[in-house]
C-alpha cells in the first residue's frame, strides 16, 4: 500500500488564513514543508480520504486525475475534511470523461452536508445521479471498496456527529488512519483497534507541543497512543508511525516536528509526503 499526504494542516491551514502569529509568519517566510494545506490523503491512487477546500489545489499540485477515482472516505463533516460544493463539478458538464461513479462514504452529518450542497437550485439542471452517490456508514459497519476492506471506527472528536477514523486493509497490509481524534474513544473502538496488527499508523497531533484531553491530540498524546498499541501487540518494530494534521496553535515548526518525530522513530507528515508499506 502507499499513502500520499496531500494536505497536512488543521482547519485554519498553516499559515492560517488570517493569522499573524510567530509560527504562521515563519511558515510564510520559509515556504516549502512549513506550509500546509488542509488534511487529505490518497491511498494507492484509488481511495481518497477527505475532501477539504484545498482539494482543487491538491489536484493541480500533484497532477491528480480525480475523475478516475471512485471512492471517497470522509472522516467527518468539519469544513477542513468535507467541502462538498466542489463535488458538483464531477457532473459530465464540468468533468468530461470522469470514470463511473464517485462513491462518497460518511456519517449522518456528512450525508446532510452532501445533499445540501449537491441539490442546490443553481445546479439542479446538472443532477449528479450518474456521477456521485452517497453511502451512509455506521460504527464498525465494515465494507469492501475496490478490494480494500474498510472499517469505520468511532473517533473521540465532535460529539454532535459520529466522527470516524478508519482501518483499511488490503493484501495483508493494514493501515490505521486516525484523523481527527483524541484518545477518549469508547471501549468498543479501542477493542476494534486492538484486534488489528498495523503496518502504518497515522495519528492526530494537531496540538503539537501541548497536551489534549480529547477531541485532538498533541505530540505526547500520539506517543502515548503508540505506546498503548505496542502494549497490545498491534504494532511492531517495522510499523511506520506518522503524526499529522498540525495546527499553528501547536506552536511547532515543521523542522521542530521532524526532530521530535525522528527521536521517537516516527515521521512528521508534510504536504506531498508519500509512504509505501
Ligand atoms: Zn480536522
Ligand atoms: Zn498562526
Ligand atoms: Zn474535525
Image: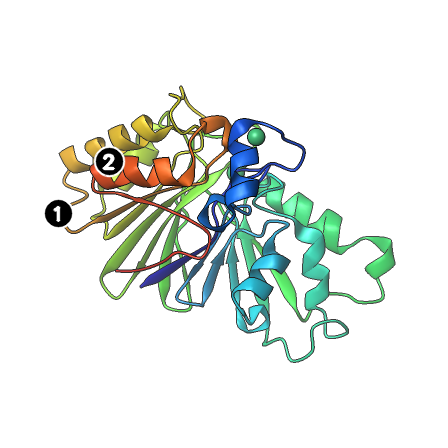
Query: Where is residue 105 drawn, in percent x and y?
Result: 53, 53
Residue ranking furthest to the bottom? 97
Above or below, 231 against 55 in this view is above
Q: Quadrant of residue 81?
A: top right
Above or below, 50 against 216 in this view is below
Query: Where is residue 207 drawn, in percent x and y?
Result: 43, 28
Q: Quadrant of residue 150?
A: bottom left
Q: Which residue is mark 2?
A: 226
**Does residue 44 appear to the left or right of 89 in the view shown?**
left
**Is residue 105 visible to us here?**
yes
Query: Within 8 Å of ligand 1, the CB of disc 1?
Result: no
**Does residue 34 appear to the left or right of 112 in the view shown?**
left
Q: Quadrant of the C terminus?
A: bottom left
Q: Mark 2: few, some, or many residues within 10 Å (few <14, many ≥20)?
A: some
Query: Where is residue 117 drawn, in percent x and y?
Result: 74, 50
- How far apart, in angstroms, are the residues tagged by discs 2 and 1? 12 Å
Secondary structure under the numbered disc 1 in the rendered image = loop
Q: Which of the numbered marks, if any, corresponds to residue 237?
A: 1
**Does residue 13 appear to the left or right of 152 in the view shown?**
right
Q: Mark 1: few, some, or many residues within 10 Å (few <14, many ≥20)?
A: few
Query: Where is residue 68 drawn, in percent x and y?
Result: 54, 73
Work out whether mark 2 precedes mark 1 in sequence or the reverse, and give the earlier one: 2
Q: Residue at x 54, y 70 (%)?
A: 63
Amino acid at each position: 500500500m502507499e499513502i500520499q499526504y496531500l494536505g497536512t494542516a488543521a482547519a485554519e491551514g498553516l499559515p492560517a488564513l488570517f493569522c499573524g502569529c510567530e509560527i504562521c509568519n515563519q511558515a510564510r517566510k520559509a515556504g516549502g514543508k512549513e506550509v500546509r494545506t488542509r488534511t487529505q490523503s490518497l491511498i494507492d491512487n484509488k481511495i481518497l480520504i477527505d475532501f477539504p477546500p484545498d482539494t482543487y489545489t491538491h489536484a493541480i499540485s500533484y497532477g491528480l486525475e480525480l475523475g478516475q477515482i471512485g471512492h471517497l472516505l470522509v472522516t467527518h463533516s468539519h469544513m477542513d475534511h468535507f467541502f462538498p460544493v466542489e463535488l458538483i463539478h464531477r457532473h459530465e458538464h464540468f468533468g468530461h470523461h470522469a470514470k463511473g461513479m464517485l462513491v462518497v462514504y460518511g456519517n449522518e452529518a456528512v450525508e446532510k452536508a452532501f445533499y445540501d450542497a449537491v441539490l442546490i437550485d443553481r445546479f439542479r439542471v446538472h443532477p449528479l445521479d450518474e456521477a456521485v452517490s452517497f453511502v451512509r456508514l455506521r460504527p464498525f459497519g465494515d465494507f469492501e471498496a475496490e478490494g480494500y476492506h474498510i472499517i469505520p471506527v468511532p473517533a473521540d472528536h465532535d460529539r454532535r456527529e459520529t466522527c470516524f477514523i478508519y482501518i483499511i486493509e488490503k493484501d495483508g497490509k493494514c493501515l490505521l488512519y486516525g484523523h481527527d481524534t483524541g484518545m477518549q474513544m469508547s471501549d468498543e473502538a479501542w477493542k476494534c483497534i486492538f484486534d488489528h496488527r498495523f503496518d502504518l499508523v497515522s495519528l492526530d497531533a494537531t496540538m503539537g507541543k501541548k497536551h489534549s484531553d480529547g477531541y485532538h491530540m498533541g505530540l505526547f498524546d500520539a506517543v502515548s497512543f503508540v505506546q498503548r498499541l505496542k502494549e497490545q501487540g498491534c504494532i511492531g518494530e517495522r510499523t511506520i508511525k506518522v503524526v499529522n494534521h498540525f495546527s499553528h496553535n501547536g506552536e511547532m515548526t515543521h523542522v521542530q516536528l521532524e526532530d521530535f518525530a525522528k527521536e521517537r522513530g516516527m515521521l512528521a507528515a508534510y504536504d506531498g509526503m508519500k509512504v509505501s508499506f
